[in-house]
Image (tube, rainbow, N blue to C red):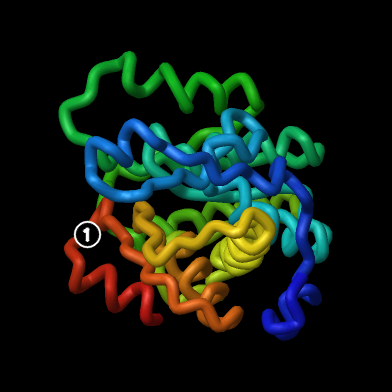
Amino acid sequence: MSSKFGRLAEYPRVPLSVVPTVIEPAPKLSAELGLNLSIKRDDLTGLAFGGNKTRQLEFYFGAAQAEGADTIVITGAVQSNYVRVAAAAAARLGMDIHVQSEERVPDVDATYCQSGNVLLGDLLGVHRHAYPVGEDEAGADKAVQAIADNLRDNGRRPYVIPLAPGHQPTGALGYVITAGEIVAQLQSSGASIDTIVLGSGSGFTHAGLLFGLRALEQETVVHGICVRRNAEAQAARIAR
């Protein structure tokens, strides 16, 4: 790990990802778009179909283990990829997991609430709780804390993975490290990039990657495509 990341190595971390993931050229799409495009294949991070959340959860589960937790408590959308990977990580590490499902998508049928990531979570042993509001991060965090309090009252040792801004951005650390991974891959191959485009929701991937690149003195532009809120609100979130 680069010394330019300061004390990052001191944060507890549980390895969950298959890394480094490849940077794969996309020649046909590049020709269609008139640019030189490559794709960082973080869909291949492993653990229940992978994705960017696997890197983030390495640090949350590291913190949970350091605190002696036996149960994870997390909140997310009904079909959350984040929750799916968290459930897989908990199963791998022998921990229980309580999931609060936020009803973010209106007018869904029963299949939506039983299939896909929900079904995978059930197979992985998820304990489910419902939260009827889809866009209330502070309320969802308050409700998740109540679940954790109840677990403590019953002798469990829960660790809460929060949702709203204002908490320590532990998940962003996974993509600070990924910045180093990308820079090392480019240096090894002799390739170069000037722009990165990614989805920006919780902001952890976006902020972590941006911070890591700047710590390594890279001027690569990072564009986040907002998936939940408008650009002005998201920019403020990333800056925090």
Q: Is residue 40 left or right of residue 60?
A: left
Q: Observer-nearest residue: 223 or 190?
A: 190
Q: Which residue is mark 1?
A: 229
Q: Secondary structure at mark 1?
A: loop
- Residue 56 position, x and y percent, is 59, 56
Three-letter amino acid code at the position of disc 1: Arg
The percent position of residue 72, horizontal first and vertical second, equals: 65, 49
| Residue 157, image x, y percentages | 75, 55
Number of marks present in the image shown: 1
Residue that appears at 65% across and 34% down: 46
Looking at the rendered image, the quarter that the C terminus falls into is bottom left
The answer to whether residue 83 is visible is: no
Frontmost residue, 10 versus 155: 10
- Which residue appears at 78% of the width and 53% of the height? 14
Is 6 left or right of 112, judged from the image as shown? right
Seen in the picture, residue 76 relative to 214 is either above or below; the reply is: above
Q: Indicate whether 74 appears above or below 127.
A: below
Of all residues, the one furthest to the top in this rendering is: 111
Indicate the quadrant containing the N terminus: top left, top right, bottom left or bottom right: bottom right
Confirm whether residue 48 shows in the render.
yes
Q: Is residue 127 left or right of residue 31?
A: right
Q: Position of residue 176 (x, y in %)?
A: 59, 68
Residue 98 position by quadrant: top right
Which one is nearer the viewer's eye here, 59 or 162?
A: 59
Q: Which residue: 75% across, 50% down? A: 156
Please name the residue shown 63% across and 44% down the image: 21
Q: Eyeballing the image, is 61 above or below 142?
A: above
